[in-house]
Image (cartoon, helix red, strand yellow):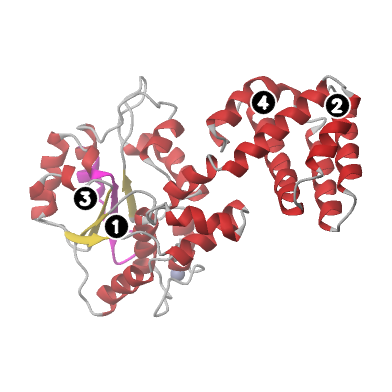
Amino acid sequence: MKFEKIIGQNEIKEKLRQSYFSNRLSHSYLFYGIPGTGKLSLAIAFAQFLSCENKSETDSCGVCPSCKKYEKLIHPDLHFIFPVISASGKKAISDSYISQWREIVLADPYFSFREWMIKLGSENKQGGIFSDESAEILRKLNLKTFESDFKIMIIWLPEKMNISCANKLLKILEEPPQNTVFMLISDNREDILATIRSRTQPVKILGIDDESLRQALVEKHNISDQIATDIVKISNGSLLEAEEQISISEETKYNLAQFIKLMRLCYARKIDEAIKWAEEISKSGREMQKSFLHYCSVLTRENFVYNYNMSKLNYMTREEEDFATNFSKFVNEKNVGMLSEIFNLAHFHIERNGNAKIIFTDTAFNIMKIIRN
Ligand SMILES: [Zn+2]
C-alpha cells in the first residue's frame, strides 16, 4: 500500500517520512485515535516505504520486488499480530487466520474490530490476542531478516492483548531487538498497559480532513456532493462513521422502499399497479431516478452474492439484508446479468433525458419477464 492510497493524513505521512530521512526512526510506534481514520493503512504504507528498494522522497515505488510483496502483504519481514477467536481445531494465534486477514485488509483497509470478528464468523465470541501469541512474537523476532533492512511487526489493537501476552511484549519492548520496528495500532490507547505505552513513541492520528473525506465518499459510494458534504459534517473525520451514515441515509431508505415495491409488483405481475408505480417515480427528479437505478443495480448484485451464500462479501444494511433473506433466491446466474442490464439501460436513457414514465414502465415489464426464471 502506497502513502498515496491513504485518504488525507498528509501531515502524518510527512512526519513519518521525515523520521526515516533524518535517521530518527523509533523502534516502536503507537498509532492511536478513533477507528476509521486510516491508522492501519498508515502503518502498512510506512512499513512498505521503509522496505522499498527504490523509494522517492514522498512514497514507496510500488513496483520493486519488496513493494510487490507488500502489495500482497506477503513480505517475509512483515509480521502481523491481531485479535483472533479461539475455535476448535485451530491454534488461537494470528497465523491461523492470516489468509482472512490479508483478504479483509486488501479488500478495504478501513474496517472495524466488529467487521473483523464478522469476517472470522464470530460476531459474539470474544476476540483477543491470547497467551499463545507471545511465543509466536518471540519466534518471529528470532527469524533473521530475509530481504530488507528492517523487520516490521504490526500489532493491531494491542488493547485486546491478555495480560500474560502483554507482559511478554513489554519485556521485548524494554530490550528491543535490532532492526525491528514495532507499530502498535490502537483504537483505545487508555486500555493498553501504561508500561507498554511509555515504551512506544505516540503518533496521534486525527480525523481525516473534511475535503479528503468528502472526495473519498463521492468516489467510493457514488453519492452526490451535497450528501457527502452533509455526512462529513457528522462523521468526526472517520470513514467508518461516514459509511455508517450512508448506510442509513434517507436516500438509501427511499431507494430500498422503491426497490421492494417494484420487485413485489413484478413478481406478482401486477401490470396496472406497475404502470402507476412508474408514473409516481417519474415525478421525482432525474438525479433521484439515476440514484435509484444505480442502487437497483448494486442491490441486485448484492442479492445474487447473498443467494450463493457468500454473505461475508456483502455490504448491506440490516434492512437490506432483511429483504434479501426472502428475495435473494430469485436472483440467480440465469437472470442476474439481464437484471443488471435492465437497470443500466434505464439509467442510460434517463441520463439522456428520455421519457421517465416510459422508461420505468418498460423497466417493470422487462423485470416481470425474467424474475421468475
Ligand atoms: Zn518499492
Instruction: Say whether residue 65 is visible.
Output: no
Q: Is mark 1 on a helix, strand or loop?
A: strand
Residue 108: x, y in percent?
49, 49
User: Total marks drawn?
Assistant: 4
Q: Mark 2 points at which residue?
A: 273
Dot placed on the residue nearer the N-terminal end, 3 or 2: 3
Q: Is residue 298 left or right of residue 117?
A: right
Q: Which of 318 and 130 is in front in this view?
A: 318
Determine crowd level at label 4: few under 14, some 14-19, many 20+ residues with C-alpha closer than 10 A. many
Q: In which quarter of the image is the C terminus?
A: top right
Q: Mark 1 points at which residue?
A: 152
Q: Mark 4 points at which residue?
A: 307
Q: In this view, does 100 lie to the left or right of 26?
A: right
Dot placed on the residue nearer the N-terminal end, 4 or 1: 1
| Residues at marks 3 and 1, CA–CA distance in whole angstroms | 12 Å
Q: What element carries label 2?
A: helix
Q: Is residue 222 above or below residue 343?
A: below
For image coordinates 15% across by 45% down, the residue present is 169
